[in-house]
Image: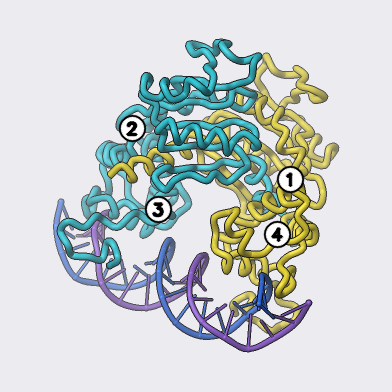
Chain colours: A yellow, B cyan, C blue, D purple
Amino acid sequence: MAVGTSSDPEARPAPAPKATVARLALYLRELDRLVRDQRETVSSQQLARALQLSAAQVRKDLALFGQFGSRGRGYQVHELRAALREVIGTNRCWHAALIGVGNLGRALLRYKGFVQRGFEIVALFDDAPDLLGKRFGDLAVLPMAELYATVAERHIDLAILAVPAEAAEGVARQVVEAGITGILSFSPTPLVVPKTVSVVSVDLALHLEQLAFQVNQSRT
Amino acid sequence: MAVGTSSDPEARPAPAPKATVARLALYLRELDRLVRDQRETVSSQQLARALQLSAAQVRKDLALFGQFGSRGRGYQVHELRAALREVIGTNRCWHAALIGVGNLGRALLRYKGFVQRGFEIVALFDDAPDLLGKRFGDLAVLPMAELYATVAERHIDLAILAVPAEAAEGVARQVVEAGITGILSFSPTPLVVPKTVSVVSVDLALHLEQLAFQVNQSRT
DNA sequence: TTATGTGAAACAGTTCACAGCA
DNA sequence: TGCTGTGAACTGTTTCACATAA
């Protein structure tokens, strides 16, 4: 029986479509902006315009998680933001380990946006001899061997991988073994992980290639 | 009349589905790996496994751009790679301007992956007084006012924006005015640009939120 | 009156299954 | 035989259009 079409009271709600999931964080980002601008309410129309989507799509997406709007009036900005935060999980702070403290890793470490949105890097790992023990801000670089113990100690939820492609597969294995269930990877390699672990992958050169293709096409 | 369903000999080929576009660079990345491993041929099956897709999808995607395979045999790795490079446009080198030379900008500047895949950063721009004129490698930081002239001089195709959110909208306008038609933006703001300009957006905190949501869901 | 929430219709993308070629 | 290229079937997503509620 298809999940979500059942009338069984024990049935889970249908999982959100992948396309919707990709937009959830966009809504939250826009709502943060509206809060800063002191806006009280917002319509699906306005959200759609700001994010370059259609109003119907915004309503469908939000309706998947509850009835947040009031007819004739729109959505209460604060209320909707709180609801979305709960759905996404950023109503609490997430602890991340940064693995790989090279150029990219150090830039991520200094990036203010993470803390602003509820993510804190609470441990650094790198096995390069010249980095081991070196301090960046409050944090000293630890050897990978200490990952397992540190995950428990510092309540680490997520790993941010900024390691070279060759190392990524091995590091991912250790991360999974340490009990981490979410990985943000910057390595240009698809990671093979158990179904219980989520991976989001950001390959910078790959994004540039997608851009090059689009530019190439529109020149036709 | 729908483009692509026409039998008009002057008709353009149907534009590739967005979903396919997002995978094109993945295929190329995997083909590079196969070349390094000295593989001569590869089947849709094998590509699919490596990239966690279905074989039919790989074949459909590739068939959109031509007939690259031979039945019973699969695809010639070199030939397919050359063809994809042509389609994507990375059979030649692309010149990019890096705008915003903060932490993230400097990390991008040192990132080896760009050059490896045919992208070269050929100019740096930042209006921060303490950065103006400072050198990073071969490049001196220029004021935004020189963008227009430099685009022509150094044959710049793309802009990489690593500026704060507040500045992004204004910088994007200048970039477009300077005649650049492709923007890779790291700012957490949707950019409004003419239809003739392509934008690819990478919001690091947003990707972490998508990850948090997925982890949150699978804990249910 | 305004703007949500939601079935139904339309569209897009993926998978199936097999004809056809090496 | 093995594997591509491709219509046809299917699944997922978006848009439409309107009943409904503030």
Q: Secondary structure at mark 2?
A: loop
Residue on which the image places disc 1: A179
Q: Nearer the viewer, residue A143 or B22?
A: B22
Are the residues under badges 1 and 4 in a single subunit?
A: no
Label 4 marks which chain's residue? B
Q: Mark 1 touching mark 2, by CB under 8 A?
A: no
Q: Mark 1 touching mark 4, by CB under 8 A?
A: no
Position of the N terminus of chain B by quadrant: bottom left
**Residue at image x 61%, y 43%?**
B189
Are the residues under badges 1 and 2 in a single subunit?
A: no
Label 1 marks which chain's residue? A
Q: Quadrant of residue B91?
A: top left
**Residue at image x 63%, y 58%?**
A47
**Residue at image x 61%, y 31%?**
B163
Residue on which the image places disc 4: B217
Q: Nearer the viewer, residue B7 or A199?
A: B7
